[in-house]
Image: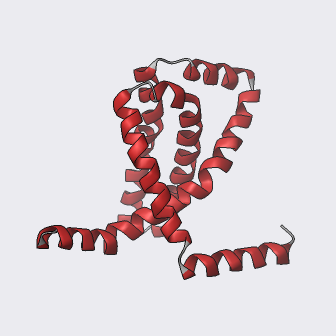
Amino acid sequence: MSYIKRLIAGLFNLTIGPLLALILIFEEWGWEPLQRLMARLARLPLWGRMERFIAALPPYGALVAFFVPALMLLPVKLLALYWISRGHAVLGITVVLTAKMLGTAAVARLFALTQPALMRLAWFASLYGRWKPWKDALIARVKDTAVWHATTARVRAIRRWIGF
């Protein structure tokens, strides 16, 4: 590997890799529970009708529906960054974290509804087929660290202590 490639790989491992791992761990933690929570809304007649409509979309319609929440949350995140830049860090961070949680919930549910249609797009299925194993390997590496083991042990102890 050339010097430049090693340098780029090293920078990724030291800067972007850990940040990306944190984001993926958050989404891994929240993906299923938030998706199940959103699925409960399907009991409401209007919400259920909307979910059936989304699940029946053709592949490119499903692709648009899948990316709508990310586009809708972008202005909210920019507003949060504005607040942070104006000295309202707690408000800005709270808005970013709330937007991230709501966005993860929406994307998780939309992916569950649109995955069959999205997988009919050859390019999407190919990208997903490469993305999923890479993401799973990165999460496995994080979960194999001493910090992860210590943190999960602490969380289990706190849950036992509070009876959760």
Which quadrant of the figure contains the N terminus? bottom left
Q: Nearer the viewer, residue 90 or 98?
A: 98
- Farthest residue in the right direction? 163
- Kindly indicate the quadrant of the structure image that contains residue 7: bottom left
Res 52 quadrant in image: top right
In percent of the image, x 53 and y 61: which residue is there? 25
From the viewer's perspective, is residue 7 above or below residue 79? Answer: below
In this rendering, does residue 23 appear at all? Answer: no
Residue at (21% x, 68% y) in the render: 8
Image coords of residue 41 (percent x, y): 71, 33
Residue shown at the point (46%, 29%) measured from the top left: 119
Is 14 in front, or is 87? Answer: 14
Q: Is residue 61 above or below residue 72?
A: above
Give the color scheme: rainbow, by chain, secondary structure or one colour. Answer: secondary structure
Q: How many marks?
A: 0
- Residue 64 visible in the displayed image: yes
Q: 136 above or below 118? A: below
Q: Is residue 156 left or right of residue 148?
A: right
Furthest residue in direction front, as rendered: 1
Q: Indicate the position of residue 150 as horizontal and vertical percent values.
A: 63, 81
- Residue at the (62%, 22%) spot, across then down: 50
Residue 134 falls left or right of residue 16: right
**Residue 160 position in % (x across, y down):** 83, 75
Picture quarter with the C terminus: bottom right
